[in-house]
Image (cartoon, helix red, strand yellow):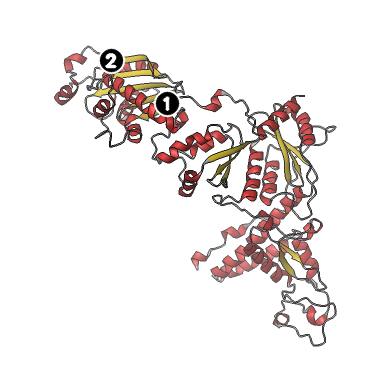
Amino acid sequence: MAGRLILEDSRRAHEGTPVQMSFSELGTDLREATFVVVDLETTGGAPGSEEITEIGAVKSRGGEVIGEFATLVNPNQPIPPFITVLTGITTAMVIDAPRIAKVLPAFLEFLGNSPDTVLVAHNARFDVGHLKAAAAALDLPFPKLMTLDTVQLARRTISKDETPNYKLGTLARVIGTQTQPNHRALDDAKATEELLQFMLGRLGPLGVTHLEDLKTATDNVPYRRRTKAHLADDLPRTPGVYRFIGPSNEVMYVGTSVNVYKRVRQYFTAAEKRSRIGEMVDLAVRVEATSTATRLEAQVLELRDIQQHSPPYNRRSKSPEKRPWIVLTNEPHPRLSIVRSVPTDNMAHALGPFTSAKAARRAKDLLERVTRIRTCTTRLPTVPKPNARACSLLDMGMCSAPCVTGIPQDAVPETRGLLSGTVDRAVESAMDNLRTLSFREEFERAADERDRLSALVRTAARHERLSLLSNIPELRASRPADRGWEIIVVRWGRLAGSAVANSVHEVLGTVEALSSATKAVEPPETACGAAPVEETELLYNWITSPTARLLNSPDQPFAVSRFSPLRFTIDVAVERTPSRSRA
């Protein structure tokens, strides 16, 4: 029963029903974060263990002060007169003060080490730099906390029209803080804390509501883009697919993530550096999402959405159904031909699908040279015409001239073998040719041969991978995940459904429920026709991962086998062939 419950959760998530998440996955609300605002006074020297003369800090949560820390520090050296004039701290004032070796442990205890704590300072590089240097000199571990510089934050939230500069004293007068900074640590920390709360109030309407948002609040992001962060508010915190929708209700971009909410929020921060995608985000009016049970299902849905909607801002293949194949023509004296689709029952005698027509032409050239099958495009009759004449390829030994002799070509059986994926002889011939061309330092011709060989070898491997999955009516597999076991059902190379089981004991029950609940997939009429090529390859990589296991029928034991390895093991050594740049 547990397996069916897990399946039902998966189905509700896929349909867009909110799934309750843990608090850790929602992020830390700024109202629940602890801010420790610190300010130091020093002797004016470089960071070190004996430079600090005063430490002041204010701890707040939810806009309310919950603690203060203030003490003078004996720097073990006279305080320079200009520092005394600036701060009012004299050498006599710090003679009886504790040394930094006693003060710093107390301050670190006040600071704490919670992941929800943020260390804040006005010009944080100075204050935090002195604290870290002192801790290092005393061999004390300094907590790894998020650090926030109110100078940088002020430059993003307070315009130059409002303030002539970003000094603490100036900003305090501009916003009207109750505590005026006076170059004494605690008062300056209090003023900085008030400044911080003022700026957080301005950032709220811009979508900066969690610590994760605050980490990018100081980034240089256009105001208009940052205000769109609310488009992610209702998105799921689960694996899924998201779609940016344009002003004419068109799908402009499709993406996937293990946490849709967090990923989409990044588009409105400086984490997104692609100018083209930034343009898309500025045009978007809303974001839609589909929650999925597993990351794999999200990746598959992404491929399908790209194929269906052809979003202009996705650079991936938008026409996977047009992948070319190489076949033998159906005529008395066949030749090689490039076609766009192949019947399912002829897949074993067709090589493909290629990534492009250019790659198909390269492989076709190599196969024609190796097998010496005819290359003319004229349809030849069974009995040659009386006045038929052979072309120059006969004299060159590159064709048996069936146009004249009428004798079936000896190259046809070998060509059929090569198209079925047994390309060893073609690879050997191409490698011999590569070695000869490289020895002659004919690097441009060697590069062309390398490209032909690469197209052939890669497609032969792809053909074998795809044929293993696309000809199976149903395949069930599972593998461990961060939470339980991920389970998939694949039919004819197409993902029929996925689910998650809490434990290994629920796997078989869950896969049975998943198989019964998913829609049937009709056997394809064309090779690899049940799903885009990218989808079948994605499933193949998932199934052949080290931790994946196939599932037999319910009356057989769990984890019965691994997916059979590729028979095709030729190493594409041609990548080491000299390139055109050396010619």
Which quadrant would residue 436 be assigned to in this image? bottom right
Q: Is residue 97 above or below residue 567?
A: above
Quadrant where the N terminus sits is: top right
Q: What is the x, y in percent for residue 463?
A: 72, 55
User: Disc 1 and disc 2: Cα gap in Å?
Assistant: 22 Å
Residue type at numbered disc 2: Thr
Q: Nearer the viewer, residue 491 or 574?
A: 491
Q: Secondary structure at mark 2?
A: strand
- Give the label on residue 71, or none: 2
Residue at 55%, 27% in the rendered image: 25
Q: What is the x, y in percent for residue 295?
A: 63, 37
- Give the label on residue 416, or none: none
Q: Is residue 402 above or below residue 277?
A: below
The residue positioned farthest toward the front in the image shown? 248
198 left or right of 247? left
Q: Is residue 116 above or below residue 445?
A: above
List the residue tagged with mark 1.
Answer: 145
The residue positioned farthest toward the top in the image shown? 96
Q: Is residue 116 above or below residue 287?
A: above
Which quadrant would residue 87 be assigned to in this image? top left
Which quadrant would residue 356 be assigned to in this image? bottom right
424 left or right of 27? right
126 left or right of 231? left
Q: Residues within 10 Å of mark 2 (few under 14, many from 20)?
A: some
